[in-house]
Image (cartoon, rainbow, N blue to C red):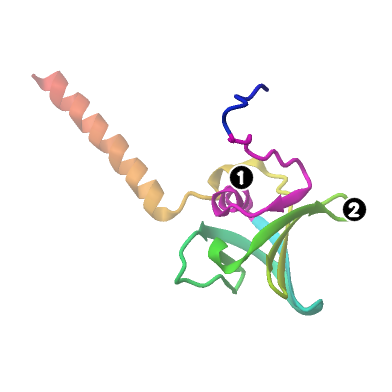
């Protein structure tokens, strides 16, 4: 890649499997692809809690909390300073969300059933909207045929 010497623009970072991500949009983009994860929460290296859950929402709002309860995970990227991307000894991808002395480690749980992957983000409201669109389109076609 060539760059214009008169310009001080540097190319955007390229992070593959390992690295530190500080840009909130990049962090959000990475986490949005996760679904079912194991999580480990520690403060000053001391385990606070761990479990499994589904990431239901990743957002970027300064006045809202990151919440983990009852197997549901809502992550606000504003709750963390950066994301450290690494691999465990067993070659699992680790997403470490870091805020001063706090680390929330997320490790994806692979889903064997591809149908689960496809339906992960489809909630009842989305399905209802899709059905409404299909029925509306069908009604439009029927009305056009009548004229």
The N terminus appears in which quarter of the rendering?
top right
Vertical arrangement, residue 123 with respect to residue 146, above or below: below
On the image, numbered disc 2 is attached to which residue? 90
Of the two numbered discs 1 and 2 in the rendering, the one whose residue sits closer to the viewer: 2
In the rendered image, residue 80, in percent from the top left (x then y), is placed at 61, 66
Q: Nearer the viewer, residue 65 or 124?
A: 65
In the rendered image, residue 145, in percent from the top left (x then y), is placed at 15, 19
Name the element at disc 1. helix
In which quarter of the view is residue 9 placed? Answer: top right
Within-10-Å neighbours for mark 2: few <14, some 14–19, many 20+: few
In the rendered image, residue 129, in percent from the top left (x then y), is placed at 33, 46
For the point 67% across and 40% down, which residue is it? 13
In which quarter of the view is residue 70 placed? Answer: bottom right
The C terminus appears in which quarter of the rendering?
top left
Instruction: Give the magenta range.
Output: 8-35
- Residue most toward the right? 89
Q: Nearer the viewer, residue 57 or 138?
A: 57
Residue 21 magenta-drawn? yes
Vertical arrangement, residue 88 with respect to residue 81, above or below: above
Vertical arrangement, residue 112 with respect to residue 4, above or below: below
In the rendered image, residue 85, in percent from the top left (x then y), is placed at 75, 52
Within-10-Å neighbours for mark 1: few <14, some 14–19, many 20+: some
Q: Nearer the viewer, residue 32 or 124?
A: 32
Cβ atoms under marks 1 and 2 closer than 8 Å: no
Judge from the rendering whether residue 35 lies leftward or rightward of residue 123; answer left or right. right
Q: Upstream in the sequence, badge 1 or badge 2?
A: 2
Q: Is residue 93 visible?
A: no
For the point 56% across and 54% down, which residue is it? 24
Q: Nearer the viewer, residue 25 or 50?
A: 25
Picture disc at residue 117? 1
Name the element at disc 2. loop
Judge from the rendering whether residue 44 lies leftward or rightward of residue 33; answer left or right. right
């Amino acid at each position: 890649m060539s760059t214009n010497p008169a310009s001080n623009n540097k190319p955007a970072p390229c992070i593959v499997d390992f690295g530190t991500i500080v840009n909130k949009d990049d962090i959000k983009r990475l986490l949005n692809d996760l679904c079912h994860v194991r999580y480990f929460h520690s403060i000053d290296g001391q385990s606070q809690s761990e479990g499994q859950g589904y990431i239901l929402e990743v957002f970027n709002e300064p006045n809202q909390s990151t919440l983990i309860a009852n197997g549901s995970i809502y992550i606000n990227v504003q709750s963390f300073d950066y994301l450290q991307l690494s691999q465990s000894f067993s070659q699992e991808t680790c997403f470490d969300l870091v805020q001063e002395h706090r680390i929330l480690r997320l490790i994806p749980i692979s889903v064997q059933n591809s149908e689960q992957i496809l339906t992960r983000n489809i909630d009842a409201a989305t399905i209802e909207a899709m059905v409404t669109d299909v029925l509306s389109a069908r009604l439009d076609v029927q009305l056009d045929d009548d004229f």
